[in-house]
Image (cartoon, coloured by chain):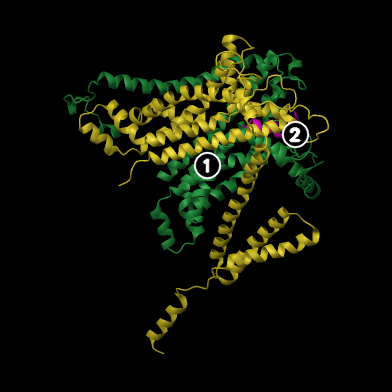
Amino acid sequence: MSATSSLAPPDGGREVEPAAGKAPRSRGDRVFAGTARAAGIAILVALAGVFVFLTVEGLPGLSQTAATYTPNTSFLSYVAPLLFGTVLAAVLALLLAVPFAFGIALFISHYAPRRLAVPVAYVVDLLAAVPSVVFGLWGARSLAPYLVGAHDWLAAHLGWLPFFDGPASVTGRTVFTAGIVLAIMVLPIITAISREIFAQTPRLNEEAALALGATRWEMIRLTVFPYARSGMVSAVMLGLGRALGETMAVAMVLSASPVVTLNLISNTNPATIASNIASSFTEATPAKLHVLIATGLVLFAFTFAVNFAARWVVGRSARRMAR
Amino acid sequence: MSTTELAVQDVTTSLRLAQPRLPRWAPALVGVLAVAAAGLPALLLGWGLVPWLFLAAVLFLVVLPLWSLAVENARAAVDRLMTSLVWTTFGVAMIPLAWLIWTVVKNGASVISIEFLTFDMRNIVSDGGGIYHALLGTLLVTGAAALISVPVGLFAAIYLVEYGKGSRLAKWVTFLVDVMTGIPSIVAGLFALALFVLIFGPEIRLGFGGSVALSLLMIPIVVRSTEEMLRLVPDDLREASYALGVPKWRTITKVVLPTSLGGIITGVMLAVARVIGETAPLLVVAGKTDSVNMNLFNERMTTLPVYIYYQFTQPGVAPAGTGGDAPGIARAWGAALVLIAIVMVLNLIARLVGKIYAPRKG
């Protein structure tokens, strides 16, 4: 509270005893402060509510009759392939997106001529707002047919890798394509955040590095990256969060089946938790609905854990910077 | 040879200020050569445009640093390599983005007509029909979501910046808002569904459920952007107001909020633009119908993104003899164009507002 004490308001113009500690506040102030506080608490309640309601509706989904889990027999064997598919697609998306995102962010903050940087940043921001369902439509109707050739090429030339162990899909609607669509979707988010962080590097540090004879890349490596590290982690984390939970693009691009396979380019592709909910939701019985909500709870817990871990990393590196 | 002469000579050789550098036009030259060199196998083997440009880019990325290594030094070569890589990432990433917009405009523009915008899908079997019901649904659901999340988000941000500094509650709220930004949208939808199913039974689907789900996604965005804007307000302004004897809440409403108003409105509109395209939660809790439904609290309500999804998954059958795509696909592209247009317009207005209300400098 030491920071605020210098700003303590004078309580409606009445006399203030500086030594009196907490002076009584006016009624308007109390109401206003109470409302603000209530809004903060409402957020906590809402988040707790997500846990509570998902748990209440999802718990019955853990113990349904075996037929509900077709083609599997228990909840664990039902959700495991889905979780695998979720992680596979998200990791693939991040592997593709992160280098590009940091590249574009650096381009905007440090490389591009100013006349180009502003419109480029604007375009990237606009693209963060393109709805996921449009990405899904484009991915399934335009990108997938186009990538069929690439699938064939990968199967022919890199078939010795488990990821490209064909036979190549003839429609192109595979995890590979879905990963590319996801990568394009998370790219603007990672770019937007890391660009702001890069631009916040203290100008004096950069100029000091350049004055010591550093090339531009050395300047970036020595001043921008250390300063931006925690921000870069949180940017990637937000991208990962979006990739893990992204529903529509995956549901529309993939022709999914509950399998566990590293093969990215064949006709049998693992579904993700989210896309499975979306595609099997409409014909779900109440029993199945419980199961789907339970898988949603798993997804929520998983993304929560990822966020938590990333926050921890960010906090740790922030402490290291402060030292 | 005197010692001074020797020293001078030594200095001039070791401390030459002008190191050999590649000419300014070196990258352009290498670029042209790389495209030309890659063009040879491309023409001979009949490659398409993409492999050609790919090979050209690889050649460029190899040749320019090597040339730099030969003439300049290793550090300059690394610098040239990274500069080229950064420019390459930019170029590559722009391709799918431009491609997406172009595809949507090309496929959607021919579909949009007065009929498409003013008809619903009632009794439509193959051709015809429109997005009127979905458009209304989107506006209603998103509007209600904004009505819920703007006050909550605004006050929560005020609490974090003005009242809660350093308190344990504020720390928790900050942390959990971070967590909330990571909630997958479909989980928000399932939450709303679970909530209403628990109250009204398993068959319940209603537009307001979609609003609840969307506001769960929208609140953290509003809190984040508002918080940032409030923090930008200089403490001098607050202290000046306190010094005049203005109570804290009047200071907030009369000084802090007006100063940051432009930024707050921009943040809210960007949040709206972000959730207006959400599909998964609405698919789950608001459901789908073919007719107009103006009541948020009763029955299913189609929104534009859900409309696109269903037109894509259940496109119907093309009229015999015409060939081409099923009618649903065309409608999906048209609706996608409308949705993108709405999002873009919201974004543009948000930026304009941000520009107009930006605090004057100096």
Compared across the picture, whether A14 is left or right of A179 comes to left
Q: Is residue A318 above or below residue B64?
A: above
Tell me what hue chain B is rendered in. Answer: yellow
Q: Which residue is drawn at 29% across and 34% down?
A: A3
- Disc 1 to disc 2, C-alpha distance: 32 Å
For the residue pair A98 and B259, the one nearer the viewer reads as B259
Q: What stretch is highlighted in magenta?
A: A246-259
Q: What residue type is labelled 1?
A: Asp
Q: Which numbered marker is on residue B183?
A: none
Q: Residue furthest bottom?
A: B1
Element marked by disc 1? helix
For disc 2, the marked residue is: A269
Compared across the picture, whether A152 is left or right of B279 comes to right
Q: In this view, does A236 lie above or below A205?
A: above
For disc 1, the marked residue is: A125
Front disc: 1 or 2: 1
